Structures are given as structure tokens and as C-alpha cells.
Image (tube, rainbow, N blue to C red):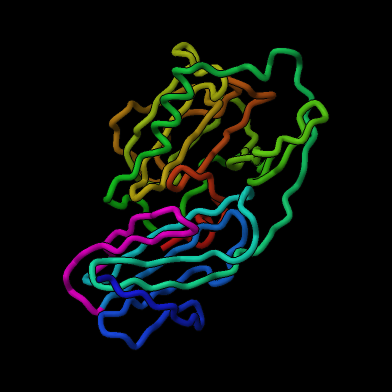
Amino acid sequence: MVGAMVSTVASGRLWSPAAHAYEVTLSPTNPRLGDTISVVISSASTAGTAPVVSVNGTNYPSFQVSGNRYRALIPTSPLDTPGQLTLNVSGSDVSRHLTVNLAGRSFATQRIWLPSGSSDLGTDHEFDRVDKFKRIVTPKRYWKGALARPSQGYVSTEFGVRRYYNGVFAKDYYHRGVDYAAATGSPVVSPAAGYVRLVGRVVDGFELHGNTIGIDHGQGVLSIMIHLSRIDVAEGDFVTAGQRIGGVGSTGASTGPHLHWGLYLHGVAVDPVPWRFKGVE
């Protein structure tokens, strides 16, 4: 039977004196809405079974870092409720529980007025392909260290902005990325190494996202670049950090030339800023 024990948390570390216990380190130790929580797990057992981390009933895989050390990445978003998160780390020999406080965070609010009919943009083909891309979780990690800035344009819209559309608050909406305003055709580069898993074009029905590139950085970490003026890669290509992949544009639902970069983790758009400046290890 899998044992269960609630252990204490000190300096971000979960510990227990029980035999074959997991030692768990969290980073950041005081996460806010939109942060990625890194869960590093060390086991006394050398059985080699990757633990699973469950957070409020949702399971997230862990991947081997070295020896008997594993890491799981947990997404949070502006739609989450601030407060206590319950994490359960379970494997073949033992189960451990801990809690961490998810702090609130203030996000800017915008009021957008759309012309009649513009809210219906998007095709089933487009949504199906984007949704399928966001579900990709490959076991190998391709990113390394802090992510590169994908455009040299200025930040025109930050992550997490909430919006009113035509006077009505969009309850389930938040800006799922960072916008960089720049001249049409300005270079767009890959923020990290990975495989191109999605290429979508306006001519193929991408009427909302516009010309789109999706990159799989491994272990559930994905970048999506939208509104591009051109695409310089093909599906299946392997790209490196800083490699030019396309150009800034205003295709799809866009009011001017800019790059929208969304960073997704296990299907949830997380704040790219900590990944850019500190990296997530």
C-alpha cells in the first residue's frame, strides 16, 4: 500500500524522516498568479519510477533530471483563485503531501470596442490545430537557461491583462502572452530550442491567429507566435534559441503590426517574464 504523510515545509523544502521519503524543493517559494512552479523531487529509492505531482486534483508528470532526481512543472494563471494549493507527490513506494500559498496579483484592465461581427473570427480547423498543439508533452527537454527575447520591439501589452469587450467584462479572458510592437517584417526569433510542431497560415483558415508558428520546447513547454507577416520554417524543423523563424506582422485579428508570444505549460498560458529573466530549472 502506498503510504501517505503530511510533511512540513521549510525554506521551500518538503522533508520527512520516513524511509524512502521524497524530498521536495519548490521554486519560487512564494509563487504569484501566472508563475510556473518548479517541483524538484529527490527519492531515497533508486527504482527509477518517475513520481506524479497532483495539484488540486490535476496530475502533472515529472521528468528525470539526474539519478533519482525528478522535476515537475506546475502552471498557474490569472484565472486561478489565490490561496492554498495542495500538492501530492506520489510514486511506487510512498506519497507525500504539502501546501503552498499562491499569492494574488494585480493585472491591468483594458476596454476594447469591437465592430459588429468581429467576435466570430476563427475556424474549426484553426481551433482544432491550436488545441492539439497545446496538448503536446514530449519527455525530452530542449530549452536551456533563460529564454531569449523573441522580438526587439517594445512591449505593447503585458501578460495577464484583463479586458472588457464592448462594455462587458470577459470573465474567462486574460492576455495569454506578451505583445511586442515592431515594424512589419521585423525579425521574430525562437525563444529556445525545440521542434516546430505547428505552422498555420491565413490562407489555410487561421483567420483569428493569423500566420502562426508553434514550437515544442519539451516536457510540456510550448511557444506560440501569432500575427506573423511571414513564416521561415516548416513543421518538423528543429530550431535553436535565437534562430530567425519569421517576421512581425498584423495578420489575423490584429490592430497593428506586432508579435504575440504565448508560453504554454501543460495547456495553460503562463507568464513568460520569469522564464526570460531568471529561467525555470
The residue at the point 55 percent across, 29 percent down is 248
User: Residue at point 24% right, 68% down?
Assistant: 66
Q: Quarter-wise, where is residue 204 in the image?
A: top left
Q: Is residue 7 depicted above or below 102 in this figure?
A: below
Please tell me which residue lies in front, 168 or 243. 168
Q: Is residue 62 magenta?
A: yes
**Residue plotted at (29% across, 59% down):** 63
Quadrant of the frame with the N terminus:
bottom left
Q: Where is residue 10 in the image (x, y as percent from the top left)?
A: 50, 83
Outermost residue on the bottom side: it is 17
Residue 230: % across, % down: 48, 22
| Image spot of residue 110 (x, y percent) | 77, 38
Q: Is residue 167 rendered to the left or right of residue 98? A: right
Q: Which of 103 and 146 is in front in this view?
A: 103
Q: Position of residue 16 (x, y in %)?
A: 37, 84
Q: Give the range drawn in magenta.
A: 44-66
- Toward the left, the furthest residue is 47
Is 31 drawn above or below residue 174 in the view shown? below
Q: Does 37 sit left or right of 52 as displayed? A: right
> In terms of image quadrants, where is residue 215?
top left
Q: Is residue 61 left or right of residue 7?
A: left
Is 144 magenta? The answer is no
- Residue at left offset 37%, top offset 67%: 89
